[in-house]
Amino acid sequence: MSLVSFRFFALTGVAVLVYYLLPLKYRWTAILASSLFFYYSLGSSALIPVICISVFSYIMGLVIEKSDESRKRKTLISIAVIVLLSILALVKLSGHFSTLSQYIIVPTGISYFSLSIIAYLLDVYWKKEKAERSPLRFLTFVLYFPKILQGPISRHKLLGEQLKEGKRFDWEQLCFGMQLVLWGLFKKIVIADRLSIAVSNVYSQLDTYREHGVVLAAAMIFSALQLYMDFSGYTDMAVGISQMFGIELEQNFNHPFFAESAAGFWQRWHMTLSGWFKDYLFLPVSRTEAVKKLSKKAGNRFGAAARKKTMMICSTAVVWIATGLWHGTGINYIVWGIYWGSLMIISQLAEGLFTKMKTALSIKEEAALWKLFRMFRTFLIFVFGKMISAQENMKNVAIILKSLFTKLHPGDVKMIAGLGMYGYDFAIVALGLILVLIVSVIQEKGVCIREQTAKWYAVPRWLFYCLAVTVILLIGLYGKGYDTSTFAYQFF
Amino acid sequence: MEELLEVLKESCPTVDFENETELVSGKVIDSMDLIAIISDIEEAFDISIDMDKIEPENFDSLEAIWELIQQIKGE
C-alpha cells in the first residue's frame, strides 16, 4: 500500500475514527490493528520476523529490568544489542550476495525500528525508563504505522507513554494534523516527484551526460532538493497523522538549509538519527577505556584542549563511519560517512584558525551577507555529499567530479530543459520551492502558521483548505504512470 | 569540595566553577568537557557514574556535582 494512495488515507481515516470511539485505555488497539494491516499490505512475509524481533526485545526489556546483578545486566544488554545489530547487518549485507538475498526477508523499516528498540533497551538498562509491560503495546510502538517506513526514530519514552495513556479528542489537533499531512503531500507529489524525474534521468544515463558538467551540477542540486522535499514531506505526513491521534512525534527537520555549518546542518537534518547517534554511540564511545587512556595521554603531553580534541576525533570518527554504514553497506556510503566525519573533525580542529581569519578580514559574525554565504556553503557541502551517496559506485563519483572540473560548458544550460521536466514542471517546482522558502523563513522567526490560520473566520479558512487540496490534486504527480509509492529514505 | 574544585579546574581550566550555576544547561561546557569531567571525577573519587546519572541538573554547578558524588558514594 502506497502512502500516497486513497487506500492509505482511507485506512488513516478509519483508524482515527475507531481510535476516538474506543475507551481511552484501549485506544492504542486501533493503532495496532491499522499498523498490522498496513505492514501486512507492504509484504505479508515480513510481518513474522518483525513480530519475532518485537517479542525478543519485549522479553529482554523485562529481564534486564528485573535483573539486579550488574554483571548479568551487562551480559543481557550486550546479547540484546548484538542480536539486533546482527539482524540489521545481515539484512543490509544480504543485498551484496545474490544467493543470500534469496533466503532473507527484508522487513520494511528495519533500520528505523531497530534503532528505536536498541534505544529502548539501553534506556531500560541505564534505568532511564521502565520496561513496557504489555507485549501488544510494545508491538504497537515498533510497528506504529505513520513512522514505520522512514521514522522519525521515536523513543519509547515519548511514544510508548502516549500510546498507553490514550489521547482525548481535540478538534484543533485533528485539523492541525490534516494540514500538516497536506503540506507534506505537497512537498512530496508536487515538488520532489517532479525533481526526481530529472535526477533519475541524468544519474541513470551518466555516460550520456559525462561530457556536460552543467547538467550534472544541475542534477546534483535537484537531487539534494528532491531528498529534502521527499524526506521532510514524509516526516510532515508522519507527524501530521500522529497529531490526528493527538500523539506528538519527535521533530526530524528544522529548516536544515538555514544551517551555517556542517555541524549545524546535522542539528537540523534527520534530527532523530543524529540524536540517536549522540546519545547511544558518541557518549558511550567517549567513555570507553581506550578513548579515555588515549585522550589522557594527549592531555598530559599537550594540555587539556588536546585531551578534548582527541576524545572528539575518536568518537566522531566512530559515529560517522557507523552513520555511513546505517545508510548502506556500499563503499560510497562509507566514503560519505568519512566525508561528513572529516568535515566535523576539521571544523572543530581549525576553529581557532577560522576565528583568527575572521578577525584579520574584519568579518562581522552577525552580518547578513556573511550568514548567507555560510548557508550557501553548507548547502553546497550537502549537495556534494548527496551526490556521493546517490551513486552506485565510486567510479561514477569520479566521472561526475571530472566533468564538474573539466566539462563545464555554459552552453549546456539549455540541456536542462530536456531532462524529462517540461517548462510547466519547472515553473511549478520553482513556485513550490519559493513557497517552502517563505514558509520556512516565517517559521524560523517563531511564527506558527497553522495557529495563525486557525484564527481566521470559518468561511475564508475552509475556502483556503479546499483551495489547497484542489491545487495538490491538480498539480501533484500521482496515479497511473507515476511511482509515488516509494520515498527516498524508505530503503535505508 | 576543595578537592572536587581542583579536579574540575584541571579538566577545564577556563571555566568559573565557583560561580556558574548552569554549566550544562547554559552551555558553559560542551559534551566533550562534560565527558572529561566525568572521567576525572571517576578517577579522583574512585566511583563509577552510570549513564542514568548523566543529566544536566547533576552537572550544572559545583554543588550539584558534589551532591552527586556523595549520593553515589552512599549507594
Image (cartoon, coloured by chain):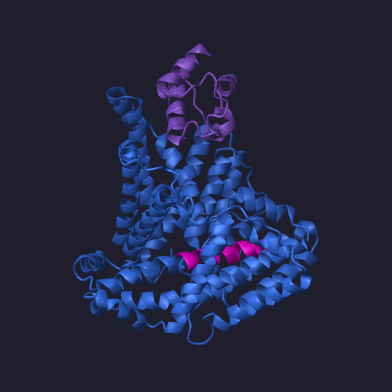
Chain colours: A blue, B purple
Q: Residue at x 70, y 64 (%)?
A: A453
Q: Is residue A485 visible?
A: no
Q: Main secondary structure of the magenta part?
A: helix
User: Along the horizontal axis of the image, is A34 left or right of A99?
Assistant: right
Residue at x-position 62% and y-position 42%: A129
Quarter of the view holding residue A172: bottom right
Is residue A203 visible from the viewing direction of this image?
yes
On whether residue A229 falls in the magenta region, the answer is: yes
Is A388 above or below relative to A65? below
**What percent of the width, then of the height, locates residue A69?**
55, 32
- Pick the front one: A376 or A170: A376
- Nearer-the-camera pick, A459 or A363: A363
Tell me the quadrant of the picture where the N terminus of chain A can be found.
bottom right
Q: Residue furthest top?
A: B2
**Magenta range:** A228-244
Residue at x 71% of width, y 76% of height? A463
Assess whether residue A391 is covered by the magenta stretch.
no
> How many labels sit on residues?
0
| Residue A251 % position (x, y) | 57, 55
Which quarter of the picture shows residue A294? top left
Q: Quadrant of residue A163?
A: bottom right
Spot occupied by residue A318 in the image (x, y as percentages of width and height): 36, 45
* Residue closest to the eye, A485 or B20: B20
Measuring from the top left, give residue B18's x and y in whole percent: 53, 18
State whether residue A47 is above or below residue A351.
below
**In the rendered image, the vertical position of residue A201 relative to residue B65, given as above or below:** below
User: Which residue is situated farthest in the front direction here?
Assistant: A362
- Quadrant that contains the C terminus of chain A: bottom left
Q: Residue furthest left?
A: A406
